[in-house]
Image (cartoon, rainbow, N blue to C red):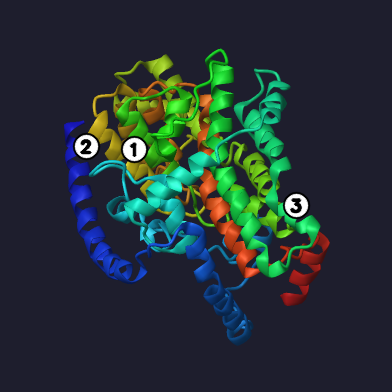
Amino acid sequence: MSFFRSISALSKLRSRAVQQSSLNSSVRWLQIQSSSNLDLHSELKEMIPDQQERLKKLKKEHGNVQIGNINVDMVLGGMRGMTGLLWETSLLDPDEGIRFRGLSIPECQEVLPAAKPGGEPLPEGLLWLLLTGKVPSKEQVDALSKDLRNRATIPDHVYKAIDALPVTAHPMTQFATGVMALQVQSEFQRAYEKGISKSKFWEPTYEDCLSLIAQVPVVAAYVYRRMYKNGQIIPVDDSLDYGANFAHMLGFDNPEMLELMRLYVTIHSDHEGGNVSAHTGHLVASALSDPYLSFAAALNGLAGPLHGLANQEVLLWIKSVVDECGENITTEQLSDYVWKTLNSGKVVPGFGHGVLRKTDPRYTCQREFALKHLPDDPLFQLVSKLYEVVPPILTELGKVKNPWPNVDAHSGVLLNHYGLTEARYFTVLFGVSRSIGICSQLIWDRALGLPLERPKSVTMDWLEKYCTKST
C-alpha cells in the first residue's frame, strides 16, 4: 500500500502541474466571467436575449456545416458517438473528463464558494455556474441557498402517494413516485394552459426547476427514513446549505459527511447530455412536458443497472469480495476473484465508461477525499487494490475500450464509511444530484426555444438495401 500511495502521490503532483496551467487560463476567463451582484433570476433575464441571438446567428450562418459522419455501427449501437444534442451546461472529453461550463472538477473545487475555507464546493454554487457560466460570490450562493430552503415545503399528498407503495418497493420507485406527485404544483403547466408566449416559457420553467431542485432532497430523505429508520422524519434545518441539509435530513451530522455530500452532489450533477437520464429529461421536455414530468422520466432512466443503479452494484460486489476472501485480501486473491467474476459472464462493476477513456476525474476527487479523511478504511484500501488489479485484467481481455474506474467505483465506499450502508438507496442520491444538471439545461432549452426532438429511425431491411447500393 505504501508503494501504491507513493505512486499516487507522484501522479497527483504531475496532475497538479498540468491542472495549474489549465487553472491559470481559467482564472483569466473567470476575470471576465465572474458573476455580478444580481440575483440568479435577474442574471438569467439579462443573459438570455444575447444567447437567443447567438443561437439564431449560429443556425443562420452555419446551419449547413456538417459535423462528422454517421455509420451503420452507430445506428445499431445505440447512437454511440453521434453528435446530435445541444447541451450548454457541461461537456465531456474522453481523455480529460467532464467540464462544467469550461471548468474541470479540480478547478471547481478551487474557485466555487465553500462552506468553510478549503472545503468542498457548495452545490448551490455549481447550480449558479451551470445556469450562467459565471462563478458566483459567497453572498450570492448564500442567497440562493436561502431561496432553495424557502421552496422546500412538500405538500401532504406527496407523502401520501409514497406511503401508498409497499415499504419494500425499490427506493427509486418511491422517489420517482414522489416527484410525479409534486407535478400538480407545476407553474409551467398552469402558464401554458393560460396561453403564455413562447418567449416567456423559460420563466415558469425556472420557477418549477428551482422548486424541484429544492424539494427532491426532502422527498429523497423521506424515502430513506421511511424505509430504513422507522419513518422518523428529520425536518429541514434553516441554518444548513443544500448538501449539508440533505445529509442532515438523512440522519447524518458528522461534519465530514456533510462535506462528502457537498462533494457528491456537485460531481454527480451533470455529465453532458447524451447519458440516459440527461437525454431522457431533455427528450421528454422537448414535447413541452413540464420539469416534474421530465425529471421523473429521467429518474426512471437513471434507475437502470447500466446507468445510475451501477453505484449500488459496486458496493454489493465489493462486500461480496470481503464476505468470501476477508478484508485483508492480497492482490493475488483479488485478481483470482476478478477473473472468477468475469468468467461467470458478469462484469466488474465500477470500471469502464461509455465515453471516457481514462480514469474518471470524479473517481479521482473522491479518492483524494478518502486519502484525506479515511485512509485506513478497509473498504477504501480494497478499492485502491482494485485500481491496481482490474485495469490490467480488463486490458488483457482485449474487449474493453476503457479499463479504468468510473465515478461509481468509489462513491459507495465513502458513503458506507460514514454509516450510509444501504446500497439499494445509493441511486436516489445520484438522482438528487442530477436534478441540478438536468434542470439547469431545461431552463436553457426553454429560453433558446429548442424544438421537439425527433430523430429518424430505419429498419434493418432499409439498412441492408442502403448498404448494398453503397458497395
Amino acid type assigned to the residue bearing label 3 in the image: Arg
Label 1: how many Cα within 10 Å (few below 14, some 14–19, many 20+): some
Residue in view at x 63 percent, y 41 percent = 299
Numbered disc in front, either 3 or 1: 3
For marks 3 and 1, the one nearer the N-term is 3
* Quadrant for the N terminus in the image: top left
Label 2: how many Cα within 10 Å (few below 14, some 14–19, many 20+): few
Residue in view at x 25 percent, y 35 percent = 371
Q: Secondary structure at mark 3?
A: helix
Q: Nearer the viewer, residue 341 or 379?
A: 379
* Contact flag, marks 1 and 2 (Cβ < 8 Å): yes
For marks 2 and 3, the one nearer the N-term is 2
Q: Nearer the viewer, residue 283 or 261?
A: 261
Q: Secondary structure at mark 1?
A: helix
Q: Secondary structure at mark 2?
A: helix
The single residue placed furthest to the right in the displayed view is 461
For marks 1 and 2, the one nearer the N-term is 2
On the image, the x and y values in percent for residue 19 come to 26, 59
Find residue 55 and report its image quarter: bottom right
Q: What's the distance in space between the residues labelled 1 and 2, CA to CA? A: 10 Å
Evaluate whether residue 378 shows in this view: yes
Find residue 158 and report its image quarter: top right
Query: From the viewer's perspective, is residue 40 above or below residue 467?
Result: above
- In the picture of the structure, the residue carrying the numbered disc 2 is 4
Q: What's the distance in space between the residues labelled 3 and 1, CA to CA? A: 51 Å
- In the picture of the structure, the residue carrying the numbered disc 1 is 387
On the image, the x and y values in percent for residue 301 come to 64, 43
- In the picture of the structure, the residue carrying the numbered disc 3 is 190
